Amino acid sequence: MIVYVPVSAEVEAYRNNRQISHDETALTEIAKNHGEMTFSLTPALAASAERLDKLYFVGDGHWTVLGNAVVAQCLSDQIARRFKSH
């Protein structure tokens, strides 16, 4: 499985109008063409009630402790669902 990690501008675009970036769309298509599954973190980060500057360090692009917590919970839920389905 390939996990798509969005930059803050992609999360903002998704929050504003559910727009998926060209990069995410291209990666998903490439993965699909090679028989790989993708999982996007964009919806989980966008669904957070926190402001983007609380999820990402400003001018840096990395997640803050809170951003890491959102992603960790999302990935944990995803893994748990996959194990339950097998």
Image: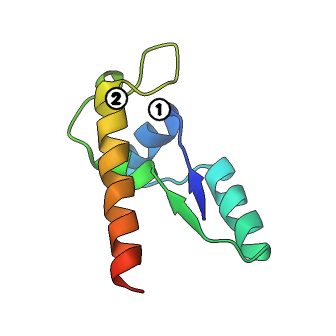
- Disc 2 to disc 1: CB gap under 8 Å: yes
- Quarter containing the C terminus: bottom left
Decide: is 43 above or below 45: below
| x and y, in percent, of residue 55 in the image | 34, 29
Q: Mark 1 — residue?
A: 8
Q: Residue at x 73, y 77 (%)?
A: 35
Decide: is 17 above or below 83: above
User: Could you tell me how far apart the alpha carbons at marks 2 and 1 are, in whole angstroms?
Assistant: 8 Å
Which numbered tag is attached to residue 65? Answer: none
Q: Which residue is drawn at 30% across and 38% down?
A: 69
| x and y, in percent, of residue 70 in the image | 30, 42
The residue lying furthest to the bottom in this view is 86
Q: Mark 2 — residue?
A: 55
Amino acid at circle 1: Ser
Q: Which of 43 and 85 is in front in this view?
A: 85
As helix, strand or loop, the secondary structure at mark 2 comes to: helix
| x and y, in percent, of residue 66 in the image | 28, 30
Answer with left or right where residue 66 lies relative to residue 3. left
Q: Quadrant of residue 29?
A: bottom right
Q: Residue at x 44, y 41 (%)?
A: 11
Q: Which residue is drawn at 78% across and 74% down?
A: 33
As helix, strand or loop, the secondary structure at mark 1 comes to: helix
Q: Nearer the viewer, residue 68 or 45?
A: 68
Answer with left or right where residue 70 lies relative to residue 37. left
The residue lying furthest to the left in this view is 49
Q: Nearer the viewer, residue 31 or 21?
A: 31
- Quarter containing the N terminus: bottom right
Amino acid at circle 2: Leu
Decide: is 12 above or below 81: above
| x and y, in percent, of residue 13 in the image | 46, 42
Q: Nearer the viewer, residue 42 or 18?
A: 42
Dot 1 crowding, Cα within 10 Å, few <14, some 14–19, many 20+: many
